[in-house]
Image (cartoon, helix red, strand yellow):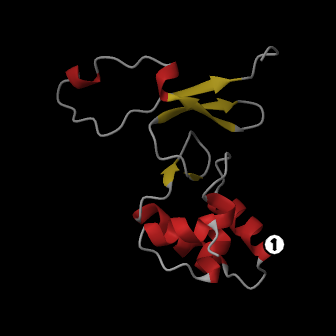
Amino acid sequence: MATRVERLLRKHGIQASPQRVAVGEVVLFTESHPTAEEVSTRARAKQSWLSRATVYNTLNLFVRKGLLRTFQLGEGPVVYDPKMAAHHHFIEERSGRIHDVPWEALKVEAVGKLKGLRVREVQVILRGEPSSRK
């Protein structure tokens, strides 16, 4: 029986090789926003035979096929995000942890009225610290 990673890969026309499945298990259903190096470390902890090049090539394939998005949220490295629906991000300033913010939580207006610009995507990045109340 195919795993959910294998099913998702096949649905997007990707051969579900053991290497791709190993990387997919780390990054395709995560709530975090890992860097390529974090994905490599986690995938190689499960499958020590994985090369770093294979991990990077697999991540690039997943991006090309629409399974992941990449972001450079500030000064840090590129991160991978499996959430393809429109949303924003909140970055904790002390820890650097990234949280998804639902699209409807913020009101973005008048983007279409920006003269001389053709906007392809909108994303608001909020920075701060979590409040003590939940």
Residue 119 as seen in the image, left or right of residue 115? right
Could you tell me residue 17's position as x and y percent? 58, 82
Could you tell me residue 130's position as x and y percent? 75, 22
Residue 107 lies in what quarter of the image? top left
Residue 100 lies in what quarter of the image? top right
> What is the count of numbered marks?
1
Residue 126 as seen in the image, left or right of residue 62? right
Residue 6 as seen in the image, left or right of residue 43? left
Q: Please tell me how crowded label 1 is: few (under 14), some (14-19), or many (20+) other residues with Cα within 10 Å.
A: few
Could you tell me residue 94's position as x and y percent? 77, 31
Q: Residue 127 versus residue 7: which sits nearer the camera? A: 7
Q: At x 67% / y 82%, what residue is drawn? A: 51
The correct choice, above or below, for 24 with respect to 79 in the image is below
Placement of the N terminus among the 4 image quadrants: bottom right
**Which residue in the protein does label 1 denote?**
45
Residue positioned most to the front: 1
The correct choice, above or below, for 114 with respect to 69 in the image is above
Q: At x 48% / y 28%, what residue is drawn? A: 103
Residue positioned most to the top: 133
Could you tell me residue 5's position as x and y percent? 60, 66
Q: Residue 128 versus residue 103: which sits nearer the camera? A: 103
Q: At x 70% / y 81%, what residue is drawn? A: 50
The correct choice, above or below, for 81 with respect to 7 in the image is above
Q: Residue 8 versus residue 65: which sits nearer the camera? A: 8
Q: Amino acid at mark 1?
A: Ala
Placement of the C terminus among the 4 image quadrants: top right
Q: From where the camera sits, is residue 66 visible?
A: yes
Secondary structure of residue under mark 1: helix
The correct choice, above or below, for 38 with respect to 46 in the image is above
Q: From where the camera sits, is residue 60 visible?
A: no
